[in-house]
Image (cartoon, helix red, strand yellow):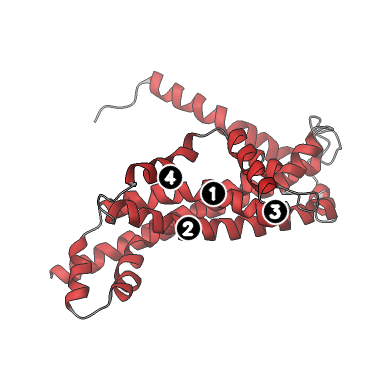
Amino acid sequence: MRAPSWFNVTSLALGFAFLYLPMLILIVYSFNDGRLVTVWAGFSTRWYAELFQNEAFLDAAWVTLRVAFLSSTLATVLGVMAALALVRGGRFLGRTLFSGMIYAPLVMPEVITGLSLLLLFIAIGMDRGIGTIVLAHTTFSMCYVSVVVSARLASFDRSLEEAALDLGASPAQTFRLVTLPIIAPAVISGWLLAFTLSLDDLVIASFTAGPAATTLPMKIFSSVRLGVTPEINALSTILIAVVATGVITASLVSKQAIARKARDERLAAG
């Protein structure tokens, strides 16, 4: 294999710097002792302490976590069902329309999605709040779960299910004991992806949230409009740490599942 050229190395370095250098600067200045976010005044954790005493941010964070957990769980259940219908359902009436409805939210502008959901909730007389945000986030995040799980199901060895059925297992038992453990890494990845998308969403939540339900991105956006404060830097650093931890955990779980599957296949073959 040839060594990478200087052009490739430079391009890669500039790309990573463009993506991660602003995050690194934000993390560094979250420990700034001064109130000005662009002037270093010494190392301090005072803004983290003040952040955890800010009731508005804490309430918004609690709303965001509840919404993200509920919507990602619902999206995972519905996304797995949709993936099973697409991959295992064969050619049924309305398959093309169903497939289009699954993939459309992936490319639909968030403004359009948020506005259409707002009009729907108004038309059916549903009060906006945490429930409407959960439904809105479930609507678009289930599509991502469906895509991830469909890719795993497409390469699934159906003979394993057939063997379980031949041994007397019911279809429900086969799915619970054979299919689900094998596709678990994809399901977990889909859940984490939906959870992250819900944490990050601002546009759709702005349309579907009510006065009593303010998510953390909405609170951050309204605060930044008045000027960036060190508390925002501290909050952003915590969010980066949470997302990074989730990604690393998902990667480790996926690697362990793949290693366990390879070990079981070697034992079965030997």
**For mark 1, what is the residue?**
139
- Between discs 3 and 1, the one toward the N terminus: 3
Nearer to us of marks 3 and 2 is 3
Q: Is residue 233 above or below residue 124?
A: above
Q: Is residue 194 above or below residue 203?
A: below
Residue 102's disc is 4
Left or right of 58 on screen, residue 27: left
- Between discs 1 and 4, the one toward the N terminus: 4
**Amino acid type, mark 4:** Ile
Q: Categorize mark 4 by other alpha carbons within 10 Å: few (<14), some (14-19), many (20+).
A: many
Residue 76's disc is 2
Distance from label 4 to label 3 (Cα)? 24 Å
Nearer to us of marks 3 and 1 is 3
**For mark 3, what is the residue?**
126
Residue drawn 48% across the image and 51% down it: 142
**Amino acid type, mark 2:** Thr
Residue drawn 73% across the image and 42% down it: 218
Do tag 1 and tag 4 residues touch (Cβ < 8 Å)? no
The kind of secondary structure element at disc 1 is helix
Distance from label 3 to label 1 (Cα)? 16 Å
